[in-house]
Amino acid sequence: MNQEVTPSALVSWSGGKDCCLAMWRARQSGMTIRRLITAMDEAGGDSRSHGVPPQLLQAQADAIGAGMRFYTTSWSNYEERFIATLNKARQDGITQAVFGDIDLLPHREWEEKVCARADMTPCLPLWDEPRQKLVDEFLALGFKAVVVCVNGNYLGEEFVGREFDAQFLADLPAHIDACGENGEFHTFVYDGPAFAHPVAFRRAEKWSCQAEAPLTPATYFFQRLTAA
């Protein structure tokens, strides 16, 4: 008798809410989430875009019950390093890559391109769903997250470090997307139904930096998190 093989997948992991919800949906659909992959800065000290230290990202993976693979990269060689990381996963028997993108077509096209280079199948569980619906689902499921980065072109420094909850959403200016899909803000998920236990962390100092190419010029405000 033929037995159906459970798909083996990795997740392109920032530590934030969208990739977390995508991972949750993929797992609920029957996929085995074997690995999370995260891009780090050249020194390996913080994740690209979100500014989260590897200790907390590893703690997320441990709580989720998945392996973790970090890769250091600059923006200039990001695609090359991403494909190399996919190729290693494919050699390890992982056949699908899960992404948390919602409706930005250039992102999907890039993901399809890099997956094709590694002979992997892209999976976008959140694709083309209303953004507000996804935020509501994330919170209703009981996931908890903290805002770790905001783009100063959209939001002030006072928004960084806050809980991502109903009050945060209510305080957003009317023109700001609730998902932050346009890069307005980024989050770090520390608890929820996908986690065997909460990830313990402390809020440390806030800091800022100027965006580097190829990002749009902006001041980014970060909330430093440390392991508790």
Image (spheres, rainbow, N blue to C red):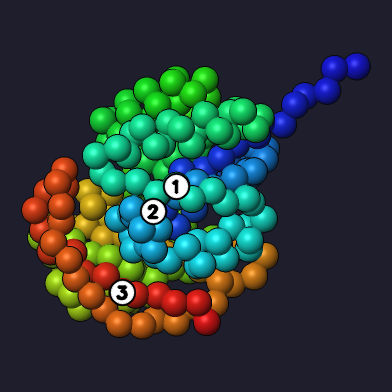
Q: Mark 3 or mark 1, which is nearer to you?
A: 1
3 or 2: tag closer to the N-terminus = 2
The quadrant holding residue 175 is bottom left
Give residue 161's position: percent from left, percent from top.
32, 76
* Marks 3 and 2 close (CB-CB < 8 Å): no
Tell me if I can see residue 201 in this picture.
yes
In this view of the protein, which residue sits in the foreground, 73 or 123? 73
* Residue positioned 43% across, 31% down in the render: 83
Q: Are marks 1 and 2 in contact (CB under 8 Å)?
A: yes
Total marks shown come to 3
Give me the residue at 32% from left, 26% from top.
Answer: 109
Residue 6: x %, y % from top left = 72, 31
Residue occupied by mark 1: 71
Amino acid of disc 2: Met
Say whether residue 19 is visible.
no
Taking the spot 32% from the left edge, 39% from the top edge, the residue there is 78
The percent coordinates of residue 220 (x first, y second) are 18, 64
Going by the numbered disc 1, the residue's amino acid type is Tyr
Q: Which residue is mark 3?
A: 223
SS at badge 1: strand
Residue 102 vertical placement versus 55 (above, below): above
Q: Residue furthest right?
A: 1
Could you say which quadrant of the image residue 156 lies in?
bottom left
Badge 3 or badge 1: first in the primary sequence:
1
Q: Nearer the viewer, residue 218 or 158?
A: 218
Q: Which residue, given by chain and number where applicable, does mark 2 sit on?
A: 40
* Crowding at mark 2 (Cα within 10 Å: few <14, some 14-19, many 20+): many
Mark 3 or 2, closer to the camera = 2
Q: Secondary structure at mark 2?
A: strand
Tell me: 198 left or right of 125.
Answer: right
Q: Quadrant of residue 5?
A: top right
